[in-house]
């Protein structure tokens, strides 16, 4: 019941505690998409809506997590509008998959009781101190993320129902002993290999590429020689941080700000109270009578904490003797709050108080009086705030003037730069798909490659990149997309054809060697002509990092004494021969158990994915984006 009391006068918040309890089901791709117009709805899954607000919150949470985890690497990816579009689509796909799983769980009749939710919360380490659930820590952590206890409880309930469904699938999969033994033998098997690496460069002198071949390749692959449209941008950029060093403040301004915002430096009075709750949404004489009886016991000197444990419907606080921790005004139900703040001294008891949640007996435990932080203690903070306010006013004024100058003098950025007291910077030529980081924002790229800026050669409007961060750009140089002429790329084509011909010559030579593998005398003479020798390696594993991946894969496909010619990523060729297949030792009991667990897990993932895909195939899914 405590979570409902704490709800008080605050609105319902739908935030998520990242990394705390949410079990995400990451499945990409949703079929049966139908484009339509859905207003504030992102998608409809079997008649249930996923709102744009839900999608945006999930998007912002995931983006923040990615930025924190991958830093600049993700920032580079996020500069690509197409990537962000796919990123958002993937999140919507996940939300749809979660909705389908929730619907399936409901259809199967899966439920989680209040007692199960309570037990799960009490057992969460995040809410424990010295291994025991701490109610004040629980409420504090929820307040820090703006989450009400009832919202958190609902999130937990959904999560636990999903876990029921996933665990029901996990429990159905298993792997037999023979499967584990066979897998162990395949995983641990090794091969004795020998391989002959044949450099393609040894055949360069045999290669000739004609003009006709170059022209034929050019015509057959002409799309490869299309260039992207490119621009070079001149720009002036201004941020609030550019103005701050020049902003000065007086002592009078600082003290005036302190006086005008004194409430920001005031710590309101807080009360620490315990209570006993007799749950009742409506007036109930029988429950009121019971509350009066318990109040009489408390007034007679019986231990309040023990009475709370015995009688209170608020099971969370009851375990701590009814302790609610410290709270200020505006947190609790108004009737409860008025009664708690009306108590004069520690230890005082209220009369029976009726709130929206039932009847309460309240005991005042402690009081934190109102405190006001001294001006000197917050001087640095106030200085920063006043400077920022003055800088923002100056920034707005400059932004307005920049907008006027950029429009009035559209053929250069000199005046814009003068107003901003910044320099005009010019980028190198770049394409839309590979912009410099500084101009990689989608809105900048859209303007930079617009017909207006390219054809009319004018300044852009002021582009707001973020709060107090603006830019004005113009196209300094433009290269239209075109197909490169043959003479521009003939040298490049010749290199490609020469490399292909040299590799083919090496491949043909390797085939001659392969034909003589059983003739040692001829084979030795042939290798000597190119000064090549076999390389041998015993007990090569499937994941051997000392040998080329291509060679290892070929070696494990071959039976003993068989050989194969493979192309290497370097452009060279290798003749690979498997000399011996080494059988692995039998797995011990521990290894077999681990392998069975791994196989069962893999089967479970496949089954779970198949369930989701089956639900998608049967579902009515509409996308409104």
Image (cartoon, helix red, strand yellow):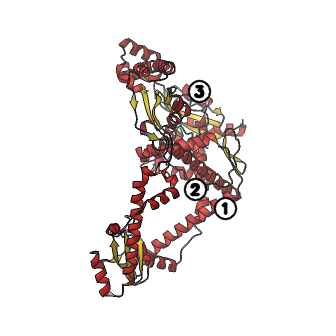
Q: Which mark is drawn over residue 27?
A: 2
Q: In the rendering, at what x and y percent does residue 161 appear? A: 62, 55
User: Looking at the picture, does residue 272 appear above or below residue 516?
Assistant: above
Is 173 in front, or is 432? 432
Number of other residues with Cα within 10 Å of mark 2, as a class: few under 14, some 14 to 19, many 20 or more:
some
Is 398 in front, or is 295? 398
User: Looking at the picture, does residue 582 appear above or below residue 213?
Assistant: below
Q: Which residue is mark 1?
A: 614
- Which of the two discs, 3 and 2, sits closer to the camera? 2
Q: In the rendering, at what x and y percent does residue 481 appear? A: 51, 43
Q: In the rendering, at what x and y percent does residue 581 appear? A: 39, 82
Number of other residues with Cα within 10 Å of mark 3, as a class: few under 14, some 14 to 19, many 20 or more:
few
Q: Which mark is drawn over residue 441?
A: none
Q: Judging from the image, what secondary structure is the residue with disc 3 in?
A: helix
Q: In the rendering, at what x and y percent does residue 510 appear? A: 38, 76
- Which of the two discs, 3 and 1, sits closer to the camera? 1
User: Looking at the picture, does residue 353 appear above or below residue 26?
Assistant: above
- Identity of the residue drawn at 43% across and 51% down: 487
Q: Identify the mark nearer the N-term, 3 or 1.
A: 3
From mark 3 to mark 2, how far is it between C-alphas? Answer: 50 Å
**Residue 303: in sight, yes or no?**
no
Q: Judging from the image, what secondary structure is the residue with disc 2 in?
A: loop
Locate the C terminus by quadrant: top right
- Identity of the residue drawn at 55% across and 64% down: 605
Q: Are marks 3 and 2 in contact (CB under 8 Å)?
A: no
User: Looking at the picture, does residue 400 appear above or below residue 441?
Assistant: above
Q: Identify the mark nearer the N-term, 3 or 2.
A: 2
- Identity of the residue drawn at 49% across and 51% down: 124
From mark 3 to mark 1, how far is it between C-alphas? Answer: 55 Å
Is 90 in front, or is 57? 90
Locate the N terminus by quadrant: top right
Q: Which residue is mark 3?
A: 338
């Amino acid at each position: 019941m405590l979570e409902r009391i704490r709800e008080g006068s605050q609105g319902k918040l739908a935030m998520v505690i990242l990394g705390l309890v949410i079990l995400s089901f990451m499945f990409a791709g949703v079929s049966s998409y139908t484009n339509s117009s859905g207003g504030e709805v992102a998608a409809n899954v079997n008649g249930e809506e996923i709102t744009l607000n839900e999608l945006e919150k999930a998007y912002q949470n995931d983006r923040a997590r990615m930025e924190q985890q991958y830093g600049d690497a993700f920032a580079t990816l996020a500069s690509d509008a197409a990537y962000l579009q796919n990123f958002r689509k993937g999140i919507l796909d996940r939300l749809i998959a979660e909705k389908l799983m929730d619907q399936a769980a409901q259809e199967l009749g899966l439920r989680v009781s209040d007692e199960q939710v309570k037990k799960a919360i009490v057992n969460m380490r995040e809410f424990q101190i010295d291994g025991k659930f701490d109610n004040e820590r629980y409420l504090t952590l929820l307040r820090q993320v703006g989450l009400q206890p009832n919202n958190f409880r609902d999130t937990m309930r959904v999560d636990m129902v999903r876990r029921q469904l996933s665990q029901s699938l996990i429990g159905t999969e298993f792997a037999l002993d023979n499967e584990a033994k066979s897998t162990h033998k395949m995983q641990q098997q090794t091969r004795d290999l020998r391989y002959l690496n044949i450099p393609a460069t040894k055949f360069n002198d045999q290669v000739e590429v004609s003009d006709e071949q170059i022209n034929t390749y050019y015509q057959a692959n002409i799309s490869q020689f299309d260039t992207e449209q490119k621009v070079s941008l001149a720009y002036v950029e201004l941020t609030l941080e550019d103005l701050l060093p020049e902003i000065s403040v007086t002592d009078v301004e600082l003290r005036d700000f302190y006086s005008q915002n004194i409430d920001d430096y005031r710590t309101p009075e807080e009360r620490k109270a315990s209570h006993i709750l007799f749950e009742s949404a409506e007036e109930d004489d029988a429950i009121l009578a019971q509350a009066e009886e318990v109040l009489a016991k408390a007034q007679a000197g019986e231990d309040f904490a023990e009475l709370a444990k015995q009688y209170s419907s608020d099971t969370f606080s009851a375990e701590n003797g009814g302790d609610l921790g410290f709270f200020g005004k505006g947190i609790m139900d108004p009737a409860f709050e008025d009664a708690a703040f009306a108590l004069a001294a520690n230890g005082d008891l209220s009369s029976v108080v009726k709130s929206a949640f039932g009847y309460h007996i309240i005991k005042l435990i402690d009081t934190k009086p109102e405190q006001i932080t001294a001006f000197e203690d917050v001087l640095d903070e106030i200085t920063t705030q006043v400077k920022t306010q003055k800088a923002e006013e100056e920034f707005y004024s400059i932004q307005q003037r920049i907008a006027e100058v950029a429009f009035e003098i559209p053929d250069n950025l000199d005046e814009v730069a003068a107003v901003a007291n910044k320099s005009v910077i010019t980028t190198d030529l770049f394409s839309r798909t590979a912009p410099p980081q500084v101009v990689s924002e989608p809105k900048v790229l859209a303007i930079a490659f617009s017909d207006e800026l390219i054809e009319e050669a004018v300044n852009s409007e002021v582009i707001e990149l973020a709060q107090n961060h603006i830019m004005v750009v113009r196209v300094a140089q433009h290269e239209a997309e075109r197909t490169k002429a043959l003479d521009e790329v003939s040298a490049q084509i010749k290199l490609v054809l020469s490399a292909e011909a040299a590799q083919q010559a090496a491949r043909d030579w390797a085939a001659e060697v392969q034909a003589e593998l059983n003739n040692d005398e001829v084979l030795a003479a042939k290798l000597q002509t190119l000064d090549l020798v076999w390389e041998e390696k015993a007990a090569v594993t499937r994941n051997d990092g000392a040998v080329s991946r291509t060679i290892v894969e070929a070696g494990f496909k071959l039976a003993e004494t068989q050989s194969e010619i493979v192309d290497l990523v370097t452009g060279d060729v290798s003749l690979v021969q498997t000399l011996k297949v080494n059988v692995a030792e039998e797995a011990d009991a521990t290894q077999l158990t681990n392998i069975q667990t791994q196989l069962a897990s893999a089967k479970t993932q496949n089954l779970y994915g198949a369930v989701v895909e089956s639900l998608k195939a049967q579902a009515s899914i509409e996308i409104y984006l």
